[in-house]
Amino acid sequence: MKQDIKEFPYKNKQCYVFTRSFNEDTEDVKFMNGEITNFVKKLKSQDGKNIWIAGGGELIHSFMKEKLVDELIITVAPILLGHGIPLFKEGEDQFNLSLKGIRTFNQFVELYYTVKKQ
């Protein structure tokens, strides 16, 4: 379903999309299909504050496996699904988290964790 967005919501941010297919960069988005570790290290060496990742379990797992994630903010919605795309990729990896805060808004709960570095 295509959303009817009148203006790109992150106009004041650099926006990168990791994809397996080829896409032309736009005015607002640069498409990436390379290795993430060097890309993130390059971003961290530049001026700026935070890198925000939004994506599926496979993308987030790639960042976490390379120890590139410092914090997780997980929002729980009051819907139970019988199937769908998992939040985290199945695997042997274990990541230890430390709860830093909980926030509620309407029926949603936001869990704020820091990732413990091993």
Image (spheres, helix red, strand yellow):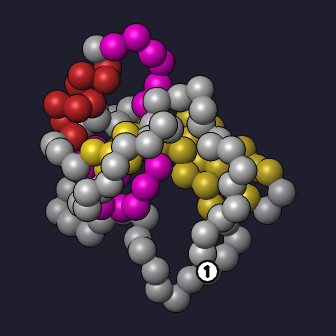
Q: Which residues are magenta?
A: 46-65
Residue plotted at (34% across, 13% down): 46
- Asked where in the image residue 78 lies, by quadrant, the reply is bottom right
Q: Position of residue 49 (x, y in %)?
A: 47, 18
- The answer to whether residue 103 is magenta is no
Q: Looking at the image, can residue 97 be seen?
A: no
Q: Position of residue 62 (x, y in %)?
A: 24, 50
Answer with left or right where residue 4 lies relative to residue 60.
Answer: right
Where's the C terminus, which quadrant?
top left
- Asked where in the image residue 94 lies, by quadrant, the reply is bottom left
Where's the N terminus, which quadrant?
bottom right
Answer with left or right where residue 82 lies relative to residue 33.
Answer: right
Write down the residue under mark 1.
80
The kind of residue tagged 1 is: Leu
Residue plotted at (61% across, 55% down): 75
Residue plotted at (28% across, 14% down): 45
